[in-house]
């Protein structure tokens, strides 16, 4: 009975993590779509009214950097600080605390 409950718990946790990952990916693609739309508008305005100075590049680079870091987080391109790393660290700290509590 306990094994069945543990399996159901693990399945539920995996489902919740997968659901959260899908929501993060959707959020990134929304961010990407708004970036493309706004950049197209800014490029149009820049080229129509002040083509001698391409100021839209500053906006494109600034927001692009933010978009890049968003992608790194969502698609787990960070070697550290991703979901697995966090879970591993949490387990390590919990084990350390359990060891300390045993000696007290």
Image (cartoon, helix red, strand yellow):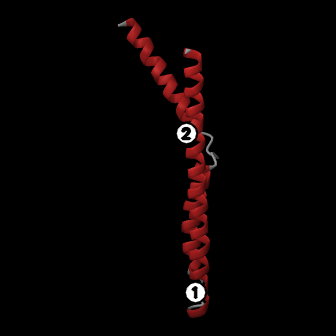
Q: Position of residue 76 (x, y in %)?
A: 62, 45
Q: Earlier in the sequence, mark 1 or mark 2?
A: 2
Image quadrant holding the C terminus, namely top left
Looking at the image, the residue that sits furthest to the bottom is 49
Near mark 2 (Cα within 10 A), the count class, few <14, some 14-19 or many ≥20, is few
Looking at the image, the residue that sits furthest to the left is 104
Q: Which residue is mark 1?
A: 46
Q: Position of residue 6 (x, y in %)?
A: 56, 21
Q: Position of residue 38 (x, y in %)?
A: 56, 76
Q: Residue at x 58, y 69 (%)?
A: 35
Q: Quadrant of residue 67?
A: bottom right
Q: Which residue is mark 2?
A: 16
Q: Check disc 2 and report its element: helix, strand or loop.
A: helix
Q: Mark 1 or mark 2, which is nearer to you?
A: 2
Near mark 1 (Cα within 10 A), the count class, few <14, some 14-19 or many ≥20, is some
Q: Residue at x 55, y 21 (%)?
A: 5
Above/below status of 96 relative to 13: above
Q: Residue at x 54, y 61 (%)?
A: 66
Question: How far separated are the C-alphas under marks 1 and 2?
Answer: 44 Å
Q: Check disc 1 and report its element: helix, strand or loop.
A: helix
């Amino acid at each position: 009975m306990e094994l069945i409950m543990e399996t159901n718990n693990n399945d539920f946790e995996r489902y919740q993590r997968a659901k959260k990952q899908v929501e993060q990916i959707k959020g990134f693609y929304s961010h990407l779509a708004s970036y493309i739309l706004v950049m197209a508008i800014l490029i149009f305005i820049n080229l129509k009214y002040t083509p001698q100075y391409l100021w839209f590049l500053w906006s494109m680079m600034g927001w692009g950097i933010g978009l890049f870091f968003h992608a790194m987080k969502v698609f787990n391109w960070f070697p550290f600080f991703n979901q697995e790393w966090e879970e591993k660290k949490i387990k390590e700290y919990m084990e350390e605390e359990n060891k300390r509590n045993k000696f007290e």
